[in-house]
Amino acid sequence: MDILKRIKNAFRKEEKPAAKIIRLESVDSTNNFLMAYTPTADEAMTVAVADYQTEGRGQGTNTWESEEGKNLLFSILLHPSEIAVRNQFLLSEYGALALKEALTDYVDEDITLKWPNDIYWRDKKLSGTLIETKLGAGRIKDCVFGIGLNVNQTDFRSDAPNPVSLCQILGREVDRDELLEKIVCSFEKNYELIRSANYAAISGMYHEAMYRNKGFHLFEDADGTFEGAIVEVEDDGHLVLRDRQGMIRTYEFKEIKYGKI
Ligand code: BTN
């Protein structure tokens, strides 16, 4: 990190999040916990963080494994009723951008957003997010962002592809409580983008921060491997690629994989 940034960070007044933070030693899954949780009327944002999850869940049928007490395993519950169900990918974009912003206090460069909502450092996965929602009358009543962020783990035994932790990137351990507070503050601050309905700005920033967003890269769909360039992510979250023949191909999550470089 450059010297100016270090000085700026050292003098910055530490912000404290307004959200309620519930700390758990062990839980099945922080997402399950918050999906079953009833907040009080004045709780705009609730966070549940655990040292260990017995049934941590990843995208689809994947599990999420993490060494006890080493990483950040947490979920953030909010109530974005201003978002219509058809625009729900905005939430993925907002969450990924908020997370990336908090991480820039630690890592200057090479952090990107891998569609739909992984955080990558170079070609390695630093964090994954599982988003779950409760809907009502075409709007999003409740949204739980479940985030697994590799912080101080340095030995990865599960078969998760390409994991990396902040400790491995920085060569030193990171205070997990401080990092969590920065992330929650970033979710709070960036929520202004949702409140102001600045959807084009959110999508533009997301596209700009995307992993492999420039030029042609290898992708793999049900028909095999091909070279494609990212054109856009549609409001409903579909990834749109252009192949070398100029053909436009549109994918849902799980229909397409990024190829190995
Ligand atoms: C992914 O597959 O990349 C998403 C992983 C999400 C894991 C986090 S850990 C905290 C929260 N609780 C869960 O059970 N899953 C999410």
Image (tube, helix red, strand yellow):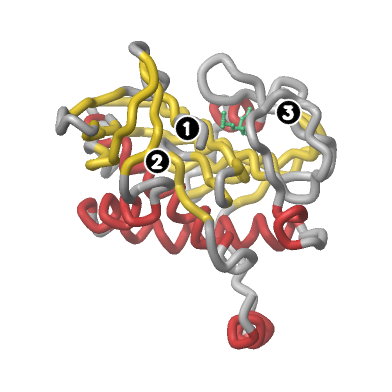
Which labelled disc corresponds to residue 131? 1
> Can residue 139 be seen here?
no
Q: Are marks 2 and 3 in contact (CB under 8 Å)?
A: no
Give the mark toward the camera: 3 or 1. 3
Q: At 33% from the left edge and 12% from the top edge, which residue is drawn?
A: 223
Query: Residue 220: image x %, image y %?
Result: 40, 22
Which labelled disc corresponds to residue 65? 3
The residues bearing labels 3 and 1 have C-alpha atoms spaced at a distance of 17 Å
**Element assignment for label 3:** loop
Q: Earlier in the sequence, mark 2 or mark 1?
A: 2
Query: Residue 47: image x %, image y %?
Result: 60, 45
Which labelled disc corresponds to residue 92? 2
The residues bearing labels 2 and 3 have C-alpha atoms spaced at a distance of 22 Å
Q: Earlier in the sequence, mark 2 or mark 3?
A: 3
Query: Residue 57: image x %, image y %?
Result: 62, 23
Q: Are marks 3 and 1 in contact (CB under 8 Å)?
A: no
Q: Amino acid at mark 1?
A: Ile
Quadrant where the N terminus is found in the figure: bottom right
Q: Amino acid at mark 2?
A: Ser
